[in-house]
Image: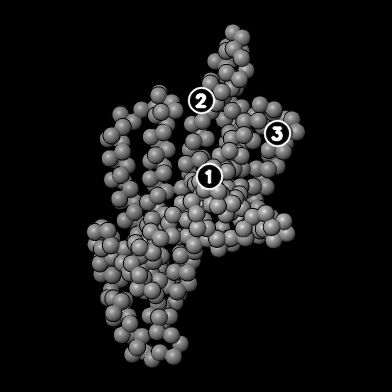
Amino acid sequence: MISMIIRRLFQLVLLLIGISFLVFASMHLAPGDPASIIAGPTASSSDIDAIKESLGLKKPFLVQYWDYLKNVLQGDLGYSYQTKQSVSEAIAVRFPNTLNLAIASIIVAVVIGLVAGIISALKQNSWLDVFSTVFSLGGISIPNFWLGSILILVFAVNLQMLPVGGLDAPFWTIEGMQQLILPAITLGTGSAAMIARMSRSSMLEVIQADYVRTARAKGVKEKSIIGVHALKNAMIPVITVIGVNFGALLGGTIITEQVFAINGVGRLMIDAIASRDFPMVQGSVLLVASLFVLVNLIVDIIYVFVDPRISYDN
């Protein structure tokens, strides 16, 4: 187990270096000049050249990347071109909101997805199964911006039951729950649909296994069969989907944060892209990529506790 964790962490470093290069190259190849944006529309060419010189943008591309990579390896993500604020500080201020939204969304997704998937499997070909299938297709198909706008219109504007947007409290507080209900449903619906489909498929496979039929033949109660025997063995692929979706949620809050005016990393990234703020975009993407890989590592570790037959020692 320890050797696997060390190996994966080493792979994480190599992966992040590759991601940093791709993001760095993409930002420099994208149309638009940060020096021109900073200087303004009335700036002269000499003013723009001076800004480029001060930002190091006149150096060769590989030299710029090597300087950036050295700073990143020392824990320095640089400073924003626009606000001159430390990238690390800017992300640290906004990341708690993104994390709160992602956690609330995955809770919604897991609760709805597991319940719908298990019931659908146990009531195969019933109206509940049909409803779950339709819900899954709808959850995957409906765009977040449309669903979020409809929820705001219905529950915040017309019924005035919940706030329109904003987030300034943790998800476990009453105020935080009220602020996160609508964005969490908006963001978590698609993940809930995928979890429901995987739960249904996995449960159907498990409840038809020989050991489940043997347990029923011995007179074991149905609740024990489902809760103790079937569910635990069906959770391996479901855990994979939950882990992948949680990692995706951490990096996929951009649209939802825009719709609900949540000051998170997603909105920070959008603003940075619009202003060609290279250090801010690169720092935000590196954070999201790191978290995604770490979540997958945690999922691999959880496998061992769910199914002792799995071993990483070989």
User: Residue 287, how many percent across, how many down?
Assistant: 38, 55
Q: Which mark is residue 179?
A: none
User: Residue 169, how many percent across, how many down?
Assistant: 50, 54
- Going 66% across and 26% down the picture, which residue do you hit? 122
The numbered mark, 1 or 2, whose residue comes first in the sequence reads 1
Q: Which tag is nearer the camera, tag 1 or tag 2?
A: 1
Q: Which residue is mark 1?
A: 106
Label 2 SS: helix
Q: Which mark is residue 233?
A: 2
The numbered mark, 3 or 2, whose residue comes first in the sequence reads 3
Q: Which residue is mark 3?
A: 129
Label 1 SS: helix
Calculate the distance from the C-alpha at mark 1 to the C-alpha at mark 2. 21 Å
Could you tell me which quadrant the C terminus lies in? top left
- Going 40% across and 24% down the picture, which residue do you hit? 308
- Going 41% across and 65% down the picture, which residue do you hit? 281
Q: Nearer the viewer, residue 201 or 231?
A: 231
User: Residue 269, how many percent across, how many down?
Assistant: 45, 64
Could you tell me which quadrant the N terminus lies in? top left
Q: Is the residue marked by circle 2 packed among few (<14), some (14-19), or many (20+) residues within 10 Å?
A: some
